[in-house]
Image (cartoon, rainbow, N blue to C red):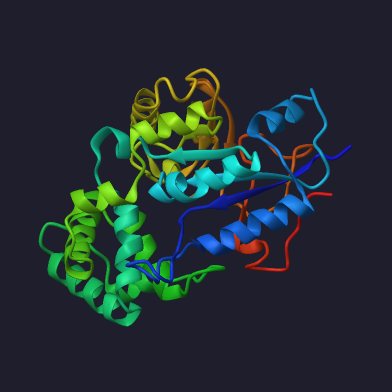
Amino acid sequence: MNNKVSIIMYHYVRSIASSRYSDIKGLDLVLFRQQIAFLKEYGNFISFEQLLEAIDGGRALPKKSVLLTFDDGYIDHYTNVFPILKENGIQGFFSMPGKILAEHKLLDVNMIHFILASTPIDKLLSFVYDRLDYYRGNEFDIPANEELYIKLAKANRFDSAEVIFVKRLLQVELEENLRHLIVKELFNKCVGMSEEAFAQELYMSEDQVRLMSKEGMLFGIHGYDHYWMNRLTQEQLQNDIQNALQVFDGIVDPNHWICCYPYGSCSETVIDYVKSQGAIAGVTTEVALADISVCDRFILPRFDTNDFPPKSENFKCSN
């Protein structure tokens, strides 16, 4: 009996080369179609409900099972992904921060993406250091630039050390108010578009989300503010999850939902709390084949779209 599934994670899916931001990290729409065609021929698409039934022992998974997940609520998922999934009879699992629907604001995490896509990294580092020097010693206690760089600049599979430094510094390392200040300043300098207009272009609307849900797509909870959940206090975590559940009332079952941890930021404390609030599973950013005979259902690993053809031939589908 097969106990393994390849859970694949997507973010931006668009015609990247011809877009306004051709350096954004994502999957080109042509390549997405090719990847779906490959996976359809090579494996067997399953829904999250099928995976949960298998975890509970109610059914066996088909060989080479594949489950598709889409993070952050981009308009790409409605205009590009949704029609292709419908055309091929595939259910996708989607999750987006509640703040997008509730407040229609551009999230810092996305401002950082487009700052990076708009600016050469050497120039951006100069801008970042300038802002750190400006705020250091006034109302903020900020370590030396070199100390911060040594601590944070750790390259990963897809980003250079310099890019990771910028991301980690502005996502989580600095005090929250300072992060917001610097991100907004950099966005205005590097992108130069109003945040409100950019958010309207970037994200799905509530009507689009509800239509996708009605048409068989599954939505989960991705927090409210897209915080690193494992860095929150218990009170902050509770507020973040409760606010997200309130926003997705009528779209997500509050007694039977799936958590997609922003940045993969889960911990025992986070898992215990989401379980107490009706979560039945969770997906992370750990890179591995999910073996449900040994995996904790609240720490399900996922591959990246770049781990499969046509982006890579070194894929590992389930047996």
Q: Residue at x 35, y 31 (%)?
A: 207
Closer to us: 201 or 89? 89
Closer to us: 247 or 224? 247
Q: In the rendered view, would you say 239 is above or below 11? A: above
Residue 91: percent from left, percent from top: 61, 37
Q: Residue furthest bottom?
A: 122
Q: Residue furthest right?
A: 1
Q: Residue furthest front?
A: 87
Q: Residue furthest left?
A: 138
264 with respect to 317 (left or right): left
Q: Residue at x 45, y 56 (%)?
A: 12
User: Is residue 269 visible to us here?
Assistant: no
Count how many numbered circles sit on residues in the image: 0
Residue 70: percent from left, percent from top: 52, 46
Q: Quadrant of residue 61?
A: top right
Residue 298: percent from left, percent from top: 61, 35
Q: Residue at x 49, y 20 (%)?
A: 253
Q: Quadrant of residue 49?
A: top right
Q: In the rendered view, would you say 30 is above or below 51? A: below
Closer to us: 28 or 235? 28
Residue 306: percent from left, percent from top: 60, 63
> Which image quarter holds the N terminus?
top right
User: Is residue 111 visible to us here?
Assistant: yes
Q: Residue at x 14, y 64 (%)?
A: 135
55 with respect to 101 (left or right): right
310 with respect to 27 (left or right): right
